[in-house]
Amino acid sequence: MSNTINYVGIDVSKKDFYACFDETSPAERFHNSIPGVNALLRRLAKENFHPQDTLLGLESTGSYHLRLCLYGNRVGFPVKILNPLIVKKYNQTKLRKVKTDKKDASLIRYCLIR
C-alpha cells in the first residue's frame, strides 16, 4: 500500500460517464452500464489505483450515478458524492467557464482533492 491517495473525478450522465485520473491527461469516456463500469475498474487496475488508496468522486445526478456508486463501493472503492451546486459554484469562480463532460470530470476531481 502506498502513501499516495489517487483521486478520480467522474462526471455521470444517462448514457455515459467521463473519468479524470490525473491533472495532465484528458478524461476518458465509458458507457454508463455494467460493462462500462467494469471497463473503468480494469482501467483503475491498469493504473494501479487500488481501493485502499483511491477515492472516487461523483456528482449527484438524479439516479444516473447510482450504478457506478453502488458497484464501485461493492468492490471496495470509497465513493464520495458531491453536491452539484458546489461544483457549479467552483466553476463560476474560474476565469474560463467551460462546461463539457470532460472538463466537468476534471473539475469534480479538483473539488474532491480540496
Image: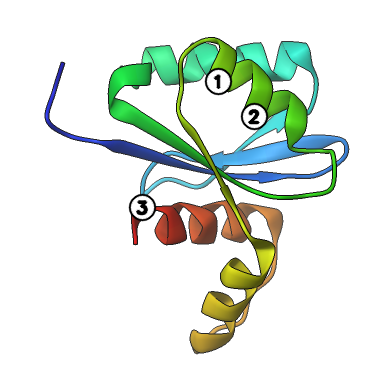
Q: Quadrant of the C terminus?
A: bottom left
Q: Quadrant of the N terminus?
A: top left
Give x and y (percent) for residue 40: 58, 21
Q: Answer yes or no: is residue 40 visible.
A: no
User: Residue 73 bears which disc, if any?
Assistant: 1
Q: Say which residue label 2 marks.
A: 69
Under circle 1, the secondary element is helix
Q: Is residue 29 above or below residue 97?
A: above
- Classify residue 32 by image quadrant: top right
On the image, the x and y values in percent for residue 74 come to: 58, 12
- Cα distance between the residues tagged 2 and 1: 6 Å
| Residue on which the image places disc 3 | 23
Structural distance between the alpha carbons of marks 3 and 1:
24 Å
Nearer mark to the viewer, of 2 and 3: 2
Please report the residue visible at 42 percent of the width from the left and 45 percent of the height from the top: 25
Q: Check disc 1: other Cα within 10 Å, few if <14, some if 14-19, many if 20+.
A: some
Q: Badge 3 local density, few (<14 within 10 Å), some, or many (20+)?
A: few
> What number of labels is visible?
3
Question: What secondary structure is marked by label 3?
Answer: loop
Mark 1: which amino acid? Asn
Residue located 63% across and 60% down the image? 83
Up-down relation of residue 20 to residue 4 (above or below):
below
Q: Residue at x 69, y 54 (%)?
A: 101
Task: In the rendered structure, find residue 100 and report the number of the disc placed on it.
Answer: none
Can you say whether 112 is above or below 31 in the image?
A: below
Q: Amino acid at mark 2?
A: Cys
Whether pointer 2 and pointer 1 mark residues with C-beta atoms closer than 8 Å, the reply is yes
Q: Earlier in the sequence, mark 3 or mark 1?
A: 3
> Would you place residue 108 above or below residue 33 in this image?
below
